Image (tube, rainbow, N blue to C red):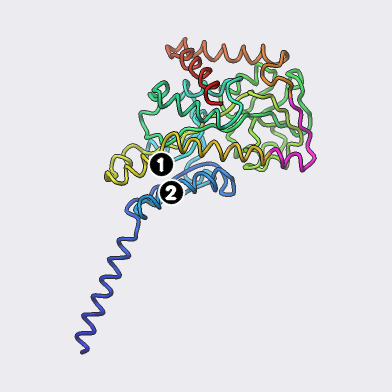
Amino acid sequence: MLKKLSVTAIATVMAFGAVTKGEAADVTLRFAHFWPAVAGAHKELFQVWADKLKEDSAGKIEVQIYPSATLAKPPAQYEAVKNRIADVTATVQGYTANRFPLTQVVELPGLVSSAKQGSCMIQSLYDEGLISDEYKDTKPIMFFTHGPGHIHTADKLVKTPEDLKGLRIRRPTAVVAKMLEELGAKPIGMPAPQSYQSMQRGVIDGVALPYEGMVAFRLNELAKNHTEVGGLYTLSFVITMNKDVYADLPADLKKVIDDNSGKAWSETAAKVFDKMDVIGREAAIKAGHTIYTVEGGSNNPAWKPVLDKATESYLAELEEKGLPGRKVYARAVELSKSCQ
């Protein structure tokens, strides 16, 4: 009887072990990004995507998310995925200088008025092959943009370009830096997570960010003045994956990744960022901040000539490098109308 029980017990343990092994993830993906874990982008986009992969793969894919740039600093996150320090990242292409010049056309003034519009534009530019050559060393999952970027200052309210003269404004990318320079500001390059400490210490006078970023990085605590120049700029983001990691997946798990890539998820990202813009603006109003809206946005006569000059300068620079900047820009303009 004892022997029979022992055999039964062993069989039970072996069966339990088999179930446990079957329930364990076959693949664990390390997902790096720079937003804090409390940010809407982390909770409502990246974590939702990770959970969907786990669900669709019946637990075979697990995504471990590393927020707040814990695996790699913001400017190094794309390289981290390329070099397999991380398996997946969500990052700003413009943080990696000179790598995505055609992609950054979407940052130019007058193109984007919402994350919905911008995300449709940038995902379409990739899907149509106009910027796809810039991503040959990774496996892009989805493209999206934040909503319109604005100018947020600690002390001085900006109403005209002249008000920007001499102000030290955090800029996210080189494209936005040139625009701010044309407007008379002194752009200071830094990733968004560094902005709070820099403004707190008086290193910068303000930031160029969407309202989403003002909440995510707590900058509404420091910047009491907000200048809305509709269509001033936006930033493009990509969630992308290491090519070898993807290539090593079995066919069924590749399908899970493919089914959770592209346009539908780009639209999901856009909804999150547009929602967070509303929350960020409402927070500024509730705090009693001053919001100044430039009539006509980037088409305002005081702003348009300067912004047009910045656009022309960037496109001319691309053409001088032998890149089809004007072709991509022309398509972006078309998409800005159809992606409304």
Task: Give x and y (percent) for residue 85.
Answer: 40, 42
The residues tagged by marks 2 and 1 sit, at their Cα atoms, a distance apart of 8 Å
Label 2, on which residue? 52
Which type of secondary structure does the marked residue at label 2 adopt?
Answer: helix
Task: Give x and y (percent) for residue 137.
Answer: 36, 31
* Residue 288 is a magenta residue: yes
Task: Give x and y (percent) for residue 328.
Answer: 47, 17
Which type of secondary structure does the marked residue at label 1 adopt?
Answer: loop
Numbered marks: total: 2
Q: In which quarter of the image is the N terminus?
A: bottom left
Quarter occupied by residue 204: top right
Q: In this view, does 57 lie to the left or right of 267?
A: left
Mark 2 crowd level (few <14, some 14–19, many ≥20, 10 Å Cα): some
Residue type highlighted by circle 2 = Lys
Residue type highlighted by circle 1 = Asn
Q: Quadrant of the C terminus?
A: top right
Going from the N terminus, do you reach mark 2 or mark 1 first?
Answer: 2
Quarter occupied by residue 4: bottom left
Q: Residue at x 77, y 23 (%)?
A: 159
In the rendered structure, find residue 174 and report the number of the disc placed on it: none
Q: Identify which residue, 91 or 267, lies in the foreground.
A: 267
Task: Give x and y (percent) for residue 293.
Answer: 74, 26
Q: Find out whether the residues at labels 2 and 1 contact each other: C-beta distance under 8 Å.
A: yes
Mark 1 crowd level (few <14, some 14–19, many ≥20, 10 Å Cα): some
Q: Is residue 243 left or right of residue 216?
A: left
Q: State whether residue 34 is above or below residue 315.
A: below
Q: Residue at x 37, y 35 (%)?
A: 139
Magenta span: 281-293
Label 1, on which residue? 260
Quarter occupied by residue 39: top right
